[in-house]
Every structure is written in structure tokens, then in C-alpha cells.
């Protein structure tokens, strides 16, 4: 082994030793320059190759390249190692308390009554109904007369309604939309609407009465509408709103604008029909009034009752919500206490 | 209507049908039984006793010592009732008995004398004191009652009472015969109505009295009997107990019989003391102007000319169908009675009862309708009972005017209509069978159903009524549940309804809670914070329940301010509400206001909470405005919206903007005026109200797709110094107007007022983005537009480029 070979081996050993003990990337970079740089010892040896004999030249050249590569590799390896360490240190420094609360965007809530109405609307849209809206200040004609409640009808009492003049009042129910919608269809069916909205009655506000409340009216008029269709639609409604296991029963009743008239009860969702406080021991809960549209109502609004039949129903979203969630006071719906409203975000 | 189960058994066999089962069946076929009560519930060991001797208690001035035969034994009972006497048969609560109110009776001593039980008053057995005869003393049986027997059956305290909720459609059940027909139909059992025998004498009533009606069609029939030899006294025990069960207090045989027949037949009767009536001629006519009458309740009543009165030819002796007059009232001395059985027009009676404020059991029956064909039978029944229980001699015949009976109404219809409307498949014989059960005459001829409707069923007149009769007796619960068949129609939300839902969602995503408040409010609130000023008077209801809810609102903001105040009073300081609802804008010359849908909001407190990162951020004007901007962005309307400073009552004069759509005011956003905050004790609160219909009703712009940009855009910033009074919007407008078409967007990113600019100036820095979809813009092109913008800002807004 000649001097150059020994020198190269010594360089290799020294470089390895230095790289091994290098502490940071700067240190390592200095070593790279020192051993492999343009002015480094290996470059120098390679530069002096011309002075070597023909035989020595390839041997020394080969060895110089090998040494240079070996040093380069060990520096690269060391560099990766140091970088990894550095990264780990940085990550350690970036550590946060992931249990601290996040930055929430405050969101509001949908009113429970609006949720009930929307749920009913969506169900009936699926059954082929459209959503109609009507005036809250209504003509006596649409509120009463067109619904088979002539002026001197015993069921009418001026004292029960908020009249503005003798002929104008706050609507007492959403039923005027029956007459208005039929009129707009000019005697030609099918008519399938539901109409949610505010209604007004001259009541003193207390836990179960409100001078303003919501109603949802339903109307379906066509050439072959049957009472059994009403029963089917209401069964779907009851199951959708109150649960799959609900049964319904129709009890005969009386409303001037339907004939026959019925009231719908559902089997109690609390006790399943055995009798409890919610259903007052009867196993049934009264939900809504309904019936087959009275021929006088059809006739007055331009439909021929010998051709068309229909059903109508009216329900109270407050009552539905109160039953469903055990709400004890109807005034909560209009006080808008956020501690009340926020409980029904998911409703 | 209170229906005695025991009484009902007179007409229908109720064997095997418990009161509970009966109540259920009646309810399910149409008449709701609201309550089922057992008057004797909880009573125990009440027997019939006979008072053998009754001596004064030696140590008391009002107690008596009675030896009472209880059948199995004779015991001593101390009794304090003023009407106690030897020989009486009385209800006795024996030792160990339980009386009303769960009171137990035990052997005891009264002032040294042993008492083995208690002689009872009816009220002590649970009967309403207001209804019980001898209300100040013990109940005394008549003689037929066996000593030692259980007393309860003899007091009808083994009865059950069904309380029927009578609606217009069930007025035929306001009497026992009507209920009997209903129950007979429901149970499919025969009904027995005995035919009354008036026991007429040979003397003809027509020779003694005459009747004339001069009241047009308001009195279709008026009939009177003359009944002599009356002995007024108590009515029999069974009748008294039935009246009590029906909620009527027994008075005397004559009065009780007329009430009893009314309960049984539904026909109100009136009895006049004939000697006091003052003439043998009955004239029924309209009341005269200013005519008055003293009614049985000793009130002087002023009559209206629409009232019908029963007169003696001169003076009114009764208000037809409502109440009798004081002067011809039946008293203990009455011997001859004029018995009225008549038909009056329901509306006439309703009006009279209303204006006289006398709703009597007679008037309410006349209002709802009485059976035209029972008017004579009821008179016969009363005559029969008066003969039997008041020793009466009934003169022959009813003297009357008008037809005593009318023909039954007939309905003809295709019988299949019943199946078509019900969705049932009943064979024709089942249909006619059900109608016959109800007492209708029904026959089927081919496709046609002929029905004759009994006159008691005044609620049945059209084919649909028969559909209901068949349906309810067949049972709605036996019908299938189907869905409507027919042609498909479009069913979806309208574009307006869809956008409304989107608006609601957006408001909630912006942190607002949805509120519902009342439409009726105070005079003061109704016209406050309206979008448009008007001097028209707000719409007021005629009879408000209170001044709090008397006037229709013209804006929603005042209601939301109230809701905010409610929460502040309860230590909830971060509150954000929105409401979408109608406001009612008065119109000139029309009492009916315009109804407009508005969106309103109110926010107060902080928009972020105080948390580990630092202090909370309070809401301010720009929080409220930002919510609206979000909405306009979502509706793609921002380009058509403008804000301009505004002064509005109740709002901060420097922190209020009117909102314009296409140059028209559609609402406002602003801070509540500090004076309002102080008066209402509120924290800084920011409100907005927008007429939402112009936003949602307008034609929505089509969504036009353009491909992703293939060329880069160029951003340039520009900082301008302007007078402080120059609104940012002015600069925006100038920049946008002069930047078109290359200027793609403008964003204000800095506003500076302070040491580096003059006192009355401010600096505003905008970031402008230039873009051409067809190519990359050169610097020269951008510079040209940028310079043009700068120049326009200098000229139009007095701006200077900030050095």
C-alpha cells in the first residue's frame, strides 16, 4: 500500500469518526465541505492523479472515488438522522392540549313549532299535497259563511273572534283556505293542499289557551275521494309523527263544514293504550278533527258535489308538540325563552 | 245531557250491557260520553229504617232520641234534624257505614246518650245540596219502602249517570226518548216508548178556552190544555230522584211533571195558573214596543219587538220558549192549570234568550230543535202524570192553532253513494238495516235508496247525512285505510317556500334563534320601528281581550326587543333572535290591512364567549349587517343591494342604515338608540327588519356556469385618503364603475384614522383583482385601468393616493 492509499484510508476513517460525532446539520455541512468540497483533500488527490504512474492511476482513482462515495453516503445518512431528530424536537415543541375547547361557530335554533310544521309539510308533500298560504285577516265570508256557517248559525259567536269590522276578522281557523283554494281551482279537481298558519281566538292566555296559535289545514278533493282515504292518510300521519306502533280510531263528531265529521284519536304513545296520565286512562289521545267536505262547502266554492268528494282535516301543531314532548304550558311557544327553544334543536 | 242508566232501562233492554260498555258504544258511534259517574260510589251500609219513637234529648234543646227499627234490630239514634218525626221511614247509616266524603259512621255518645248510626240527609249521601228536597233536614221515604232493606236502590244511588256532550248533530239526544232511540240503534235492540193516556174527561177544553196565534211563521204550532182540580203537593219519590239525577231540583208535582216530560220527550211545557192568567183567551203575538214583563225570577224584563209572548189578550204572561211570567206562576194554591205545549222558531228563541240573558233548559231545547211530532204526545204525557200525581181532571182535547204534526222528510239517493263516500262495500240490505235500527223508514229499489227521516232527527236532511248515519253505526273503525287514487299532480314547495326555508336555515347558521311572537300588540308597539312611516291608524280589533293584544303589528322588531328584555331580566345577556312573520299595514279606505311578510332580527351581548383564548367579542352594527349580507349573498342579490345612512326613530342616528333593493327601501339595520336602551334597561342591541317578499318573490337569476379560469388574475392594492365624511360605499361604486370590465373584485382591507393622516381625513385601502378570461393581462393593461380608477376616485370623491 502506498502513501496515497494510506492517506485515503486515513481520510475515510477520520471522516467517519467526525460524521459520527456531528451534532447538528451545520456541523455536518462543514464536514461535507471539509472532506468532499472543491478544496478538500480527496479533490486534491484526484487533481494530482496526472502525476501518477499508469498502473497506479486506476487503483488510486478507484479508491478515491470509493472513499468519496462512502463519506458522502455516511453524511447523507447522518443528515437524515439529524433532520429526523430536529423534526421530532420541533413536533415536541408544537404539542398542544388537545382537550382545550375548540372554536365553535355559534348557531341558532329552529323553533319547535316550525319544526313540527315542516315535518308535517314534508310528509304531505310526499303524499302529493302542496303547501298553501292565506291571509290572517280574513273576510267573514271565507272564515264562516263559505264553510256552511251562515251569519245566524248557533256555533258562531262574535264574542269568540277578534273582529275588525262586522265583515273582517282575524281568522279563527285555517279552514278559510279550503274555500279560497277551491274557488281558485274553478270547479276542477284534484285539489290537494295543506295550509299551516297562525289563527286567533278571543281566549284568555293560560297554560292551555292562547289567543294566537297555529293550525295546519288539509284538503283533498277529487272525483273518488273516500272516508277510507282520510283514514289511510291520517294513519300514515299518525305513524310518521308519533311512531310506527300507533293505531288510530275515528270517532263521529260534528263540524258544520264536514259531513260526515270525525275526530281522530291515536293510541297513547306513552302507555301503548293501557291507560296512563297522558291519555287520562282511556288509552287514546284526541289529535285532530276531520271529515268529508260538506256538499254545501263544495257547492259554494264552485265544485259540483255530485261529481267531487273530498276530505279535510285540521290539527294544532302546539297540541302535537305538547303531547309529544310533555310540554305543560302553551305560552312557552310564544315567550321564546332560549332555555326552552334550545331543547328542541334536533326536533 | 245527564242520562240515568236506570231510567234508560224503561225504554231499552240493557241486560248484559254495563254502564262502561254502554258509554263506550255510544262514544264510538257518535255522541261523546264525557263523564261516567256512579252517584252511590263509596257508600256502605245504608239501610231503610223506621223511626218508632222520637223524644227530645234530655240534655239538648234540638237533639232527638229516636228508636229506629232497622229490620233486624231496633237501635237508638240521636238525630238533630228539625224535620225528624216518629213514623218516618228514613235512610240510616248504620254502625260501620260509610257516607259521602268517605266518612265512617261509628257508635258514639251525644251528651251522654248512645247513638248507633246516623239518619241521613240526601246531601250526606253525596247528592248535590242544591238539588236535594228538604235541604235542611233528613230525607223521608214514602211508605212503600221496606224497612231493613238496602236504602241505595230506593234513592237511585245504585245508578250510573252518563254525561253526553251534545253537539248540533246530536240535539235529538237532549231527551230520554231520543237517547233511547240512539242506544237502541247502537245496541241493535228494540225501543219501547209507551203511548201516554191523558185520561180526558167529557168536558171539552174548547168550550172553556180559545187560542189564537198572530206571530207569522215564528209559532208553527201552539196548543193548550185546560186541567182542573189540581192538588199541588210533592211529586212521587221516583220522579224526584230522576229529576235530581238529571240535575233538576224537585219543587212540586205540577212543576216537576212539566220538567219530567221535558226531559223525557224533549218538549218544553209551560204551566200557567189559569185563575191568575186573567182571561180564557190565549193570544200569542210579538211583543210591542217598550213592552215589559216580570218573569218567574222576579226580574222586570224589557222585551224586543222580535220576541214572541204568550198573552191573555192584553198582557204578556210568558216569553215564548224562554220563561214564564210571575203573575200567572203555579203556586201551592193553584187549582186550574193551562198547560202549554208549543213549537217556536229556534232563531226567535235564541235571539230572545240572548238579549234577555236567560238561557233556560226550555230555550236551549227550542234553539237546538224539538221534535215536531211529539208536541201532542208530550201534552198527553203531562196530562197523564197530572191525573195520577196531582188528582187532576183533564178537559177533553188540546186547543191549538197550527198543524200538530208534519210529514217526515224523505231522502232519495243511490245507495252505492254510501259505499263510495265511505270506501266500504256494504250490501244494500245492511245499509237499509242500519237505517231501520235508527228508526228511519228505508227501502231499496234497484239502485235507489228511499229513506223517510223521523222528525226527531232534525240533523238529517241530505244524502251525506245518511252516509254519516250508516258510517257511524257500522263503525268507522271497521272501514279500511286506503290512500287517495287519481291523476298525479305536482307536489312540491313553491320557489318562494323553498327560499323561505333557506332563509330560515341561514339565519340559524348565523347564530340566530327563531322566535314566534304575537301579531296583536299594544297601540304603542304596533306602529314603532316600521320600515315605512305612515300616518294611517293601526288596525285595532273591536273587542280585545286586553290592551296588551289589541292592535295588529306593523313591524316585528318591537316584539323581538321585548324578547331580548325578557332574557336580560333573567341574566341571559347573549341573545340573538330572528322572526319571519306577517305584519299588517293599514290601507286607506279599506279596513283590511295589507299583509306583508317581514324578516326581523335582534342581537345583543357577545358574538364569541369569553374563553381560554381571551376576551369575548361584543356584537355590533357590523355583526347585524353581516347577517343581512350573508342572506343577500345566498340569494345572489348583493349586487342590487345598497346601504345608506339613515335617521329613524328609536335607532342610533349615526349607526343606522336603510337597506335598498334596486334603489327602493326594503328595510333597515341599526343600533337601538341609547335613550331606548336606557328606558328599556337593555344592553347595546342591534336590530334589523326587512320586507322579505321583494327578496324572495322576484324572478331568481339563472345560474350561469363558466369554466375554471385558464389565465391568472392580477392583484393590485390601492390606498386612498379621503375626508372622513366620504362613505366607503361611494369609493366602492366609483371603483367598480371605472374598473369594468377587467376589475373582477374589490375588497376593503384597511380603514385608518389617526396620526398619519389629517384630522378630518381617513385612509382606506382596497385590494383590487383584475382578470380577463381570454388571456393573461399585461402590466400596461392593468396600469391603465388602475390609473383610471385612481383618477375617478380623485375627481369624484376627492381622494388622494396615500404616499
Image (cartoon, rainbow, N blue to C red):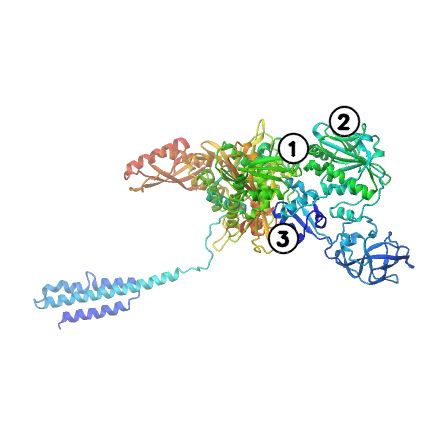
Mark 3: few/some/many CA within 10 Å (<14, 14-19, 20+)? few
For the residue labelled by badge 2, is the local secondary structure a helix, a strand or a loop? loop
For mark 2, name the chain. B
Q: Which of A264 and B748 is in front in this view?
A: A264
Which of pointers 3 and 1 lies earlier in the amino acid sequence? Answer: 1
Q: Mark 3 — residue?
A: A280
Q: Is residue B191 left or right of residue B394?
A: left
Bin the neighbour count of mark 1 within 10 Å (Cα to Cα): few under 14, some 14-19, many 20 and up: few
Crowding around mark 2 (Cα neighbors within 10 Å: few <14, some 14 to 19, many 20+) is: some
Residue at 33 percent across and 64 percent down: it is: A85
Q: Mark 1 points at which residue?
A: A152
Q: Is residue A19 left or right of residue A334?
A: left
Report in which chain the residue with disc 3 lies. Answer: A
- Residue at mark 1 shares a chain with residue at mark 2: no
Is residue B187 at least partly visible in the picture?
A: yes
The image shows residue B179 at horizontal and vertical percentages of: 68, 44
x, y percent for residue A104 = 46, 52
State the mark number for residue A113.
none
Q: How many labels does the image show?
A: 3
Q: Residue B288 carries which label?
A: 2
Amino acid at each position: 500500500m502506498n502513501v496515497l492509499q494510506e492517506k485515503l484510508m486515513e481520510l475515510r476513517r477520520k471522516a467517519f469518526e467526525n460524521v459520527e460525532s456531528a451534532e447538528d446539520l451545520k456541523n455536518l455541512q462543514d464536514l461535507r465541505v471539509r472532506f468532499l468540497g472543491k478544496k478538500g483533500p480527496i479533490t486534491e488527490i484526484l487533481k494530482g492523479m496526472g502525476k501518477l504512474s499508469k498502473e497506479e492511476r486506476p487503483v488510486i482513482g478507484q479508491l478515491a472515488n470509493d472513499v468519496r462515495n462512502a463519506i458522502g453516503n455516511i453524511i447523507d445518512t447522518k443528515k437524515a438522522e439529524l433532520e429526523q431528530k430536529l423534526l421530532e424536537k420541533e413536533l415536541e415543541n408544537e404539542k398542544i392540549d388537545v382537550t382545550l375547547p375548540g372554536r365553535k361557530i355559534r348557531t341558532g335554533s329552529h323553533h319547535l313549532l316550525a319544526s313540527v310544521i315542516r315535518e308535517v309539510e314534508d310528509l304531505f308533500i310526499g303524499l302529493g299535497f302542496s303547501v298553501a298560504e292565506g291571509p290572517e285577516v280574513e273576510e267573514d265570508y271565507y272564515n264562516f259563511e263559505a264553510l256552511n256557517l251562515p251569519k245566524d248559525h248557533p256555533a258562531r259567536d262574535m264574542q269568540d273572534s277578534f273582529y275588525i269590522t262586522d265583515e273582517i276578522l282575524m281568522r279563527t281557523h285555517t279552514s278559510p283556505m279550503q274555500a279560497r283554494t277551491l274557488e281558485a281551482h274553478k270547479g276542477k279537481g284534484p285539489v290537494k293542499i295543506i295550509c299551516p298558519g297562525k289563527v286567533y281566538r278571543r281566549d284568555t292566555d293560560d297554560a292551555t289557551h292562547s289567543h294566537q296559535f297555529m293550525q295546519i289545514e288539509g284538503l283533498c278533493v277529487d272525483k273518488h275521494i273516500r272516508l277510507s282515504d282520510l283514514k289511510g292518510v291520517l294513519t300514515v300521519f299518525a305513524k310518521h309523527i308519533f311512531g310506527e306502533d300507533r293505531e288510530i280510531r275515528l270517532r263521529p263528531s260534528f263540524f258544520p263544514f264536514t259531513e260526515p265529521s270525525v275526530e281522530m284519536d291515536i293510541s297513547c304513545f306513552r302507555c301503548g293504550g293501557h291507560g296512563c296520565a297522558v291519555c287520562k286512562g282511556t288509552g287514546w289521545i284526541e289529535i285532530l278533527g276531520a271529515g268529508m267536505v260538506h256538499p254545501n262547502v263544495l257547492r259554494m266554492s264552485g265544485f259540483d258535489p255530485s261529481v267531487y268528494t273530498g276530505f279535510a282535516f285540521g290539527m294544532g301543531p302546539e297540541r302535537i308538540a305538547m303531547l309529544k314532548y310533555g310540554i305543560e304550558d302553551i305560552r312557552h311557544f310564544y315567550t321564546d325563552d332560549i332555555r326552552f327553544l334550545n331543547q328542541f334543536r334536533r326536533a | 245531557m245527564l242520562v240515568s242508566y236506570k231510567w234508560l232501562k224503561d225504554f231499552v233492554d240493557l241486560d248484559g250491557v254495563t254502564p262502561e260498555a254502554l258509554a263506550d258504544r255510544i262514544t264510538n258511534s257518535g255522541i261523546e260520553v264525557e263523564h261516567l259517574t256512579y252517584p252511590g260510589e263509596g257508600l256502605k251500609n245504608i239501610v231503610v229504617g223506621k223511626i218508632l219513637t222520637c223524644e227530645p234529648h234530655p240534655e239538648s234543646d234540638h237533639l232527638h232520641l229516636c228508636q229506629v227499627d232497622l229490620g233486624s234490630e231496633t237501635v237508638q239514634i240521636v238525630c238533630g234534624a228539625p224535620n225528624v218525626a216518629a213514623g218516618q221511614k228514613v235512610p240510616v247509616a248504620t254502625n260501620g257505614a260509610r257516607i259521602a266524603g268517605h266518612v265512617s259512621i261509628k257508635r258514639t255518645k251525644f251528651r251522654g246518650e248512645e247513638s248507633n248510626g246516623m239518619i241521613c240527609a240526601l246531601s250526606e249521601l253525596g247528592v248535590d245540596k242544591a238539588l236535594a228536597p228538604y235541604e235542611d233536614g233528613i230525607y223521608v221515604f214514602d211508605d212503600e219502602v221496606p224497612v231493613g232493606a238496602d236504602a241505595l236502590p230506593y234513592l237511585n244511588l245504585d245508578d250510573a249517570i252518563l254525561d253526553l256532550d251534545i253537539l248540533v248533530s246530536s240535539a235529538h239526544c237532549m231527551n230520554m226518548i231520543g237517547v233511547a232511540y240512539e242506544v237502541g240503534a247502537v245496541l241493535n235492540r228494540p225501543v219501547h216508548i209507551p203511548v201516554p193516556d191523558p185520561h180526558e174527561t167529557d168536558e171539552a177544553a174548547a168550550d172553556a178556552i180559545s187560542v189564537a196565534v198572530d206571530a207569522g211563521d215564528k209559532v208553527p204550532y201552539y196548543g193548550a190544555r185546560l186541567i182542573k182540580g189540581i192538588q199541588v203537593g210533592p211529586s212521587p219519590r221516583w220522579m224526584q230522584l230522576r229529576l235530581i239525577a238529571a240535575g233538576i231540583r224537585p219543587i212540586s208535582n205540577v212543576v216537576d211533571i212539566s220538567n219530567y216530560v221535558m226531559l223525557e220527550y224533549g218538549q218544553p211545557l209551560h204551566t200557567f195558573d189559569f185563575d191568575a192568567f186573567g182571561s180564557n183567551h190565549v193570544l200569542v203575538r210579538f211583543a210591542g214596543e217598550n213592552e215589559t214583563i216580570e218573569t218567574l225570577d222576579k226580574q222586570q224584563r224589557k222585551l224586543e219587538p222580535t220576541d214572541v209572548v204568550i198573552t191573555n189578550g192584553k198582557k204578556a204572561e210568558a216569553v215564548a220558549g224562554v220563561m214564564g211570567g210571575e203573575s200567572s206562576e203555579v203556586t201551592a194554591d193553584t187549582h186550574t192549570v193551562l198547560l202549554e205545549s208549543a213549537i217556536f222558531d229556534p232563531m226567535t228563541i235564541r235571539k230572545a234568550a240572548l238579549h234577555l240573558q236567560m238561557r233556560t233548559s226550555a230555550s236551549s231545547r227550542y234553539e237546538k230543535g224539538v221534535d215536531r211530532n211529539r208536541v201532542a204526545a208530550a201534552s198527553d204525557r203531562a196530562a197523564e202524570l197530572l191525573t195520577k200525581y196531582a188528582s187532576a181532571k183533564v178537559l177533553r182535547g188540546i186547543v191549538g192553532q197550527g198543524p200538530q204534526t208534519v210529514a217526515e222528510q224523505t231522502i232519495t239517493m243511490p245507495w252505492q253513494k254510501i259505499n263510495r263516500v265511505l270506501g266500504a262495500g256494504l250490501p244494500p240490505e245492511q245499509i237499509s238495516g242500519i237505517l231501520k235500527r235508527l228508526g228511519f223508514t228505508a227501502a231499496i229499489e234497484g239502485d235507489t235508496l228511499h229513506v223517510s227521516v223521523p222528525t226527531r232527527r232534525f240533523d238529517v236532511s241530505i244524502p251525506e247525512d245518511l252516509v254519516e248515519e250508516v258510517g257511524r253505526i257500522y263503525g268507522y273503525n271497521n272501514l279500511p285505510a286506503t290512500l287517495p287514487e287519481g291523476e298525479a299532480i305536482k307536489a312540491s314547495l313553491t320557489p318562494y317556500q323553498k327560499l323561505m326555508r333557506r332563509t330560515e336555515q341561514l339565519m340559524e347558521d348565523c347564530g340566530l334563534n327563531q322566535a314566534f311572537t304575537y301579531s296583536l300588540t299594544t297601540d304603542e308597539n304596533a306602529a314603532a320601528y316600521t320600515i315605512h312611516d305612515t300616518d294611517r291608524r293601526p288596525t285595532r280589533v273591536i273587542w280585545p281581550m286586553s290592551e296588551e293584544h289589541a292592535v295588529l303589528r306593523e313591524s316585528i322588531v318591537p316584539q323581538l326587543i321585548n324578547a331580548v328584555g325578557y332574557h336580560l331580566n333573567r341574566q341571559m345577556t347573549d341573545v340573538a333572535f330572528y322572526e319571519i312573520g306577517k305584519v299588517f299595514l293599514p290601507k286607506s279606505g279599506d279596513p283590511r290591512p295589507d299583509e306583508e311578510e317581514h324578516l326581523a332580527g335582534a342581537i345583543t351581548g357577545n358574538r364569541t364567549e369569553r374563553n381560554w383564548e381571551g376576551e369575548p367579542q361584543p356584537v355590533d352594527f357590523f355583526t347585524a349587517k353581516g347577517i343581512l349580507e350573508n342572506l343577500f349573498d345566498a340569494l345572489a342579490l348583493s349586487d342590487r343591494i345598497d346601504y345608506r345612512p339613515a335617521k329613524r326613530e328609536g335607532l342610533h342616528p349615526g349607526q343606522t342604515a336603510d337597506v335598498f333593493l334596486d334603489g327602493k327601501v326594503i328595510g333597515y339595520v341599526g343600533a337601538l338608540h341609547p335613550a331606548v336602551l336606557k328606558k328599556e334597561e337593555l344592553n347595546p342591541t342591534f336590530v334589523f327588519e326587512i320586507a322579505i317578499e321583494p327578496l324572495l318573490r322576484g324572478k331568481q337569476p339563472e345560474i350561469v356556469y363558466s369554466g375554471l379560469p385558464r389565465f391568472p388574475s392580477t392583484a393590485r392594492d390601492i390606498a386612498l385618503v379621503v375626508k372622513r365624511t366620504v362613505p366607503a360605499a361611494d369609493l366602492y361604486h366609483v371603483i367598480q364603475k371605472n374598473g369594468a370590465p377587467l376589475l373582477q373584485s374589490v375588497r376593503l382591507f384597511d380603514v385608518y384614522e389617526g396620526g398619519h393622516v389629517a384630522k378630518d381625513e381617513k385612509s382606506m385601502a382596497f385590494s383590487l383583482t383584475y382578470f380577463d378570461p381570454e388571456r393573461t393581462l399585461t402590466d400596461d393593461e392593468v396600469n391603465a385601468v388602475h390609473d383610471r380608477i385612481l383618477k375617478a376616485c380623485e375627481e369624484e370623491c376627492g381622494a388622494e393616493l396615500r404616499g
